[in-house]
Image: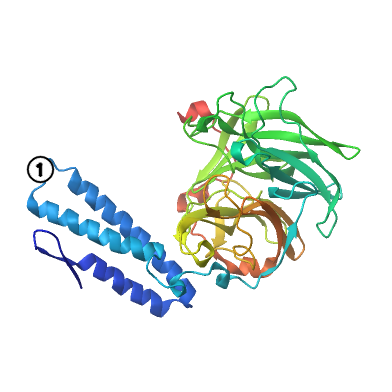
Amino acid sequence: MFESRCEFSVPIKFSHFANLQKVSFVLQTRSHDENHYRFSKQHLISVFLKNLKNRFFDWAKAPIIDDRKLVRICAFLNVFCLSWLSLTGKGYADSELIDLEEMAQDFVLETKKIEIPGYPFAFNPSIIRWQGRLIMSFRVIDDPKASFNSWIGLIFLDDNFNPIGEPQKLIMRPADSTVPCRAEDARFLIAGDRLWMIYSDNAEPKISRGGYRVYIATVIETDGHFSLEGIECLSRFEGENQNFREKNWVPFEYEGQLLLAYSLKPHRIFIPMAETGECWTVATTPTLVDWAWGDLRGGTPAIFDENIGEYLAFFHSSKNMATVHSDGAVVSHYFIGAYTFSRHPPFNITRISQEPIVGRGFYRGTIYKPYWKPVRVVFPCGIIVEQDYIWITYGRQDHEIWITKLDKKRLLNHLTPVKLPKENHDRPTMYAKSPRDTK
């Protein structure tokens, strides 16, 4: 039991903090290794801090704060400081910090860095096999002082994922436009005999969060030269908010049609209506999962796998935490996970990773001056599924391009089933709802 005294010399017993210590001990005795224990404990403390903060705000809303309430607030601040020290790792030895790469799984077979000629800091690649050839996209920020301006390039790869020929910068603005290109993080998808590119951009003269929207376009390849046709901004959809930055929608093909997963939790599916800038909602299903490493966000496109009879994709999430990779500082760490969803509407998520997918070199390596804030990033954008293996292309530290090879069978064994909402079993066909119907 912890005890503290404020200036009123009133003893405060921290039963809640004692319970935290007890649960921490249970975690330690039941976790499969020390690294897993430290990771679980950090998540526990972060939840504890959130509960304390909510309690403090309840007290602060009271019209009168007497001495007793003031003592409780002082106690809260004391516990907050103790918990923050434990959460951040400040004052603790390096042995208390998590080494994420100790979590590396055996189904992560190998990793390889891909370097684009002339663009050493290209990042966030997608990949696809189109007409028998591998094509990879990449993102480039020319000026770190203008980090919101970026462009997307394409390059051919051989079957060993080595670049072939010269990289090509895509033209993504009209010739008379004065707005710089702000294109981000392309994804490829084949649907209806067309090669689609899905990406984020902001075409506003004066940049704002609400100006970032998802775009779709058709990639045209003529004698080895790439161009985009039919560039369309998707600006009207269920949940559209001018204060929210749109990105990381998950493209997939269904019966020759391009569909887009707007979110994973819930799993909301859009169908873009050609040449209208509008998306209709196809399905929305709850995702009953407990993922402790941040909010689920889109990553790679989803690919239908005939062998498993489901779609397979990889998501990303992020969490502020301290690790050996951040030298004990609390920074955003990004994670990769896998999930599957049903082949027909309403496209329920059926299986998901229990913990982040980690390979050697994901978090160790060169640390660059950040464009925006300190991070430890692995960011999945591309996927190829062929026979018994999966390849994921990902950006590392917003400055590098990597590809990793996974054993598909072992990966799928790593996933845990997701409980399906009972009410969704009664909806066997697609439906469509316009944004006007959802307001």
* Place of residue 143 in the rendered image (x, y in percent of width and height, measured from the top left): 65, 39
Please indicate whether residue 171 sits to the left or right of residue 74 in the image.
right
- Residue lying furthest top: 176
Please name the residue that numbered disc 1 is placed on: 64
- Residue lying furthest bottom: 29
* Place of residue 371 in the rendered image (x, y in percent of width and height, measured from the top left): 58, 45
Front residue of 273/107: it is 107
* Place of residue 91 in the rendered image (x, y in percent of width and height, measured from the top left): 37, 68
Please indicate whether residue 288 sits to the left or right of residue 338 in the image.
left
Q: In this view, does 257 lie above or below 48?
A: above
Across the whole image, how many numbered discs are drawn on residues? 1
Q: Which residue is drawn at 11% across and 46% down?
A: 65
Look at the image and name its color scheme. Answer: rainbow
Q: Tell me the amino acid under the disc marked 1.
A: Ile
Badge 1 marks a residue whose secondary structure is loop
- Residue lying furthest right: 223
Residue 289 can be seen in this image: no
Front residue of 98/246: it is 98
Residue 167 can be seen in this image: yes
Which quarter of the rendering shows the C terminus?
top left
Front residue of 429/359: it is 359
Q: Quadrant of residue 103?
A: bottom right
Q: Residue at x 12, y 40 (%)?
A: 63
Q: In this view, does 81 lie above or below 121?
A: below
* Place of residue 1 in the rendered image (x, y in percent of width and height, measured from the top left): 20, 73
Q: Residue at x 67, y 57 (%)?
A: 309
- Label 1: few (<14), some or many (≥20) within 10 Å? few
